[in-house]
Image (cartoon, grey):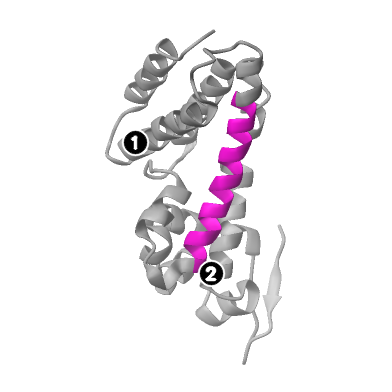
Amino acid sequence: MKIESCSLRGRPREFDPDAALAAALQVFWQRGYDGASLSDLTEAMGITKPSLYSCFGNKEELFRRALELYERDKLCYTRSALEAETAKGVAERFLRGTVALQRDDDKDTRACLGVISLVACTTQAESIRDQVKARQASSTRALIERFERAQQEGDFPADLKPDALAAYLYAVLQGMGVQSSSGASIEQLEQLVETTLAVWPGR
């Protein structure tokens, strides 16, 4: 276990920064950036506010690192999804990965961290909004490029735009997260997966 000591006035406080960051992620994921107060964060992380500032900089930097952890640990399936042989295979891996994320989470099911933060952010958190948008734009661009290649390979009709297909898939994925947050069961989410794949254009 990695333990760090933060240089604070008085006695240093020791804690595991990785565990603290994972706890912060859970708070941000449940409440969004604006909805997560410093008191909520420090209580979940088991540290004091001076320790948070000393080791993570500030709330914005803490969120940035939590977002990186989220993408690395929770969204790792998206990278392998782009390697599927067909566009439908790409969609299936994204859809099933989203269901698995809800199934594996031992907390309350919830929507995508990026979606939560974009919806909840006020003008006071424009830098967070811009950061989330930039990351989403990069992911969307990668998916569109994959669908462009799939179209060239004859995976779906030539009159269907790859960017529109990518937007459709993301709308379904985000909708699944919102429905899960509203109490939809894993079985209901799996039905959405099967329905989406049944109407997916092409092979």
* Residue 138 belongs to magenta span: yes
Label 1 Cα crowd, 10 Å radius (few <14 / some 14-19 / many 20+): many
The residue positioned farthest toward the front in the image shown: 159
Q: Nearer the viewer, residue 159 or 200?
A: 159
Task: Indicate whether 155 appears above or below 70.
Answer: above
According to the image, label 2 marks what residue?
Answer: 60
Q: Main secondary structure of the magenta part?
A: helix
Judged by depth in the image, the label closer to the viewer, 1 or 2, is 2
Q: Place residue 82 in its image quadrant.
A: top right
CA distance separating discs 1 and 2: 27 Å
- Identify the residue at horizontal 63%, vertical 79% (top origin): 54
Label 2 crowding class (10 Å Cα cut-off): few <14, some 14-19, many 20+?
A: some
Above or below, 6 relative to 164: below
User: Which quadrant: the N terminus?
Assistant: bottom right
* Residue holding disc 1: 180
Looking at the image, which residue is at 54% across and 26% down? 162
Give how far across and how far down residue 202 sits, in percent: 51, 9
Percent position (x, y) of residue 117?
A: 42, 56
What segment is highlighted magenta in the picture? 127-147
N-terminal label among 1 and 2: 2
Amino acid at pointer 1: Ser
Quadrant of image for the C terminus: top right
The image shows residue 48 at horizontal and vertical percentages of 52, 77
Residue 75 visible in this rendered orientation of the protein: no
Give the quadrant of residue 200: top left
Tell me where residue 185 appears, x and y as whole percent. Answer: 32, 28
Left or right: residue 40 versus residue 68 is left
Q: Considering depth in this image, is 56 or 123 the residue closer to the camera?
A: 123
- Tell me the element at label 1: helix
Q: Residue furthest top?
A: 203
